[in-house]
Every structure is written in structure tokens, then in C-alpha cells.
Amino acid sequence: MKRIIRFAGVLLLAVFITVVLGTLIPRPLLQSGETGQGPLRRILVLTNPIHTDIAIPIDAEMLERFDFLRTAGLPVDLSEVRYLVFGWGSRAFYIETPTWSQLKAVPVLKALSLDNSTMHVEVAGAIPEPNPVVAGYDLGEDGFQRLLTFIEESFRQGANGPELIEGAAYGDYDAFFEANGYFNALVGCNTWTAGALRAAGLQTGWWNPLPVTLGYSLRLHN
């Protein structure tokens, strides 16, 4: 029993050190300085205790670029819609857990081990700032376009474009699509968000599996 306790203690310490170093060490090591060049485009990072999303203001360019969302039935043309909100995550956990009260063991186990991934997209109205769960970042045009490309390339493409997961939506204002990549405890929704932000020219921590570590690293390195 003592050996098990000692092993568990060493493991927890190793995880703690890894998370701390993953937050403090910037990625990339040198700031490119590209996020603020040219006209600025503001994006938002939305957080909850375990997950992060990226919210991008809707305009004519966004509606044209992501026209498949309209085809999938998302009400992107409503006058009150201001943002498209994108997130990447575990297929089983994301789809089968619309609320915490519906949490099940099997989706959790899949998310912690290995699962297929999904893209979740929803439309949103005005998102006020400042807000404890909202962080805004200003991107130059090049960085903004790289962010959109990163998001586009996260959708798995079928014969007719991104593959909608029929019947998986939480309601009338969101949709799920098949995604590229596999989800696990080391490569999760927050590491996807971090990768998207790095593509846009921001610095994150080297490894940010949690919203709190991602948020801290963004404040620290940018």
C-alpha cells in the first residue's frame, strides 16, 4: 500500500510540474509580432471550467466562407446573430453531455483515453466585455485569416464538404460536425484552442490542457 501511495504521489507531482512548465514556457518561444499588423479583427475566447471556444464576429466574409453552416440548418442570417462560436472536442463526451446532469461514465472514459473528435458550432448574439469568462484578442488580417484556415481544416471533409452529424445538436442554434484528429487526455479541446490561437500569431503555454492554464499563459505571454 505504501508503494502505491508513493507512486501516486510521485505521479501527481510529475503532472503538477508538467502543467506548470507547460504554462510558463511560451510556444512559440519567440513572439512573431504579427497579430497587430494592419486593420485589427477582434476575436473572443470563451471559457467554462473544462472547455474553451473561439467566437468570431459574423460578417459577409464569414457567411461566405462558412456557407455550409447555413446548408446544415444553422440560423446564421438572423438579425440578432453576432458571432459564430467554434469548439473542438471528444465526440462521445461533447454530444452526449449537453448538461452536467447528463454526465455518463462511458463518454468520460472515452475522453480520458481515446475518442473520435467533433467540431461544435453555434450562433450567438452580443457577448459583453469585460467578462470573467470572456477574453478578447485583436488580430491583424494575416493572423485572422490563418485562424480561419486552422478552423476550416479542423472539419473532416466528405464528398460534399464538412460532414454534419445528424440529430446531435443541443437545440436550434448549434450543430456538430465530424472533425479531424483524435481526442485524449493530453490532446483535448483546450490544446485545440491553443493551437488555433498560435496559428493566429499569439503565444500560448507549451501545453495547456485546462482553461485556467491556457488563460494564464495567454495573459503572461501576450
Image: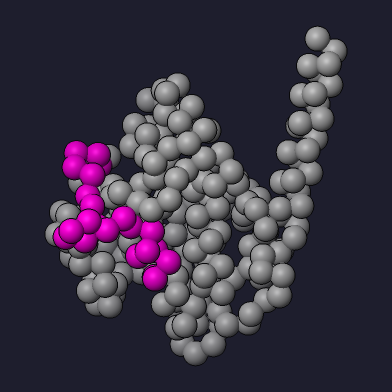
Question: At 50% from the left edge and 57% from the top edge, which residue is drawn?
Answer: 193
At horizontal 37% and vertical 64% (from top left) the residue drawn is 153
> How was the colour assigned to the protein in this rendering?
one colour
Q: Position of residue 55 (x, y in %)?
A: 41, 61
Note whether residue 147 is visible.
yes
Query: Farthest residue toward the bottom?
Result: 38
Q: Is residue 72 left or right of residue 134?
A: left
Q: Residue furthest top?
A: 1
In the rendered view, does 187 fall on the left or right side of 65?
right
Residue 47 shows in the view: no
Figure label count: 0
Instruction: Give above or below for 123 relative to 36.
Output: above
Q: Quadrant of the N terminus?
A: top right
Residue 100 position within the rendered picture, expressed as x and y whole percent measured from the top left: 43, 29
Which residue is drawn at the image coordinates 51% and 72% (left, top)?
200
List x then y, in percent, for residue 106. 42, 23
Q: Is residue 1 left or right of residue 186?
A: right
Quadrant, the C terminus: bottom right
104 left or right, relative to 199: left
Residue 36 in the image, given as x and y percentages of width and height: 56, 83
| Closest to the observer, 74 or 176 | 176
Query: Which stretch is magenta?
Result: 148-169
Residue for point 31% across, 55% down: 156
Q: Is residue 155 magenta?
A: yes
The quadrant in which residue 110 appears is top left
- Work out whether 32 lies above or below 75: below
Is 39 one of the magenta-colored residues?
no
